[in-house]
Image (spheres, rainbow, N blue to C red):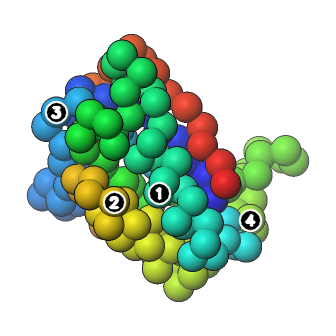
């Protein structure tokens, strides 16, 4: 499981002209990719890492600052570009595997008391954000 976590002052996701998820205060925009071999145990670990990641201002985490997260599924994080000019997606989980695991990460975050907005799995999404810093990290479990 792989995530790109960006510290933002605000972010939103739009599908077909409709905002489907947004955070309007400082927090994390999380682009979340699911690997073909991932499972629910990894979802719990990823949720804990994202919630407790001390990358907000003053070394705070979403847990300590009560900051929101916007989680957006992003299978392209497992695109392999080592050969040729066209990425290979063989490492990315199939949608029927990935969607429940994205939901599991979101559920675990909410179970920890986090405020979580989401994109729409499988949809063509427009993601907007105001990066803070910019400060972006790659999180893998």
Position above or below: 57 against 98? above
Spatial distance from mark 3 to mark 1, Cα to Cα? 20 Å
Front in this rendered view, residue 65 or 86: 65
Q: Which mark is residue 112?
A: 2
Q: Residue at x 52, y 41 (%)?
A: 4
Report the front residue among 28 and 15: 28
Question: In which quadrant will I find the N terminus?
Answer: bottom right
Q: Are marks 1 and 2 in contact (CB under 8 Å)?
A: yes
**Residue with the mark numbered 3:** 25
Q: Nearer the viewer, mark 3 or mark 4?
A: 3
Q: Is residue 22 above or below residue 44?
A: above
* Residue assigned mark 1: 47
- Of label 3 and label 1, which has the lower sequence position? 3
Q: Earlier in the sequence, mark 2 or mark 3?
A: 3
Residue 31: x and y in percent read: 46, 48
Residue receiving disc 4: 91
Dot 2: element: loop
Cα distance in 3D space between marks 2 and 3: 19 Å
Q: Nearer the viewer, mark 4 or mark 1?
A: 1
Mark 1 or 2, closer to the camera: 2
N-terminal-most mark, 4 or 2? 4
Depth check, front residue: 83 or 41: 41
Q: Earlier in the sequence, mark 3 or mark 4?
A: 3
Residue at the limit of the structure toward the bottom, as seen here: 96
């Amino acid at each position: 499981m792989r995530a790109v976590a960006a510290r933002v002052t605000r972010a939103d996701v739009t599908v077909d002209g409709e905002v489907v998820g947004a955070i309007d205060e400082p927090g994390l925009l999380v682009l979340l990719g699911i690997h073909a071999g991932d499972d629910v145990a990894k979802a719990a670990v990823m949720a804990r890492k994202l919630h407790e990641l001390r990358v907000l201002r003053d070394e705070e985490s979403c847990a300590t600052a009560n900051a929101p997260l916007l989680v957006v599924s992003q299978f392209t994080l497992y695109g392999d570009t080592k050969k040729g000019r066209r990425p290979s997606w063989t490492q990315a989980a199939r949608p029927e595997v990935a969607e429940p695991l994205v939901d599991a990460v979101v559920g675990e975050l909410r179970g920890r008391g986090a405020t979580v907005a989401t994109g729409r799995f499988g949809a063509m999404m427009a993601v907007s954000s105001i990066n803070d810093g910019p400060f972006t990290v790659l999180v893998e479990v």
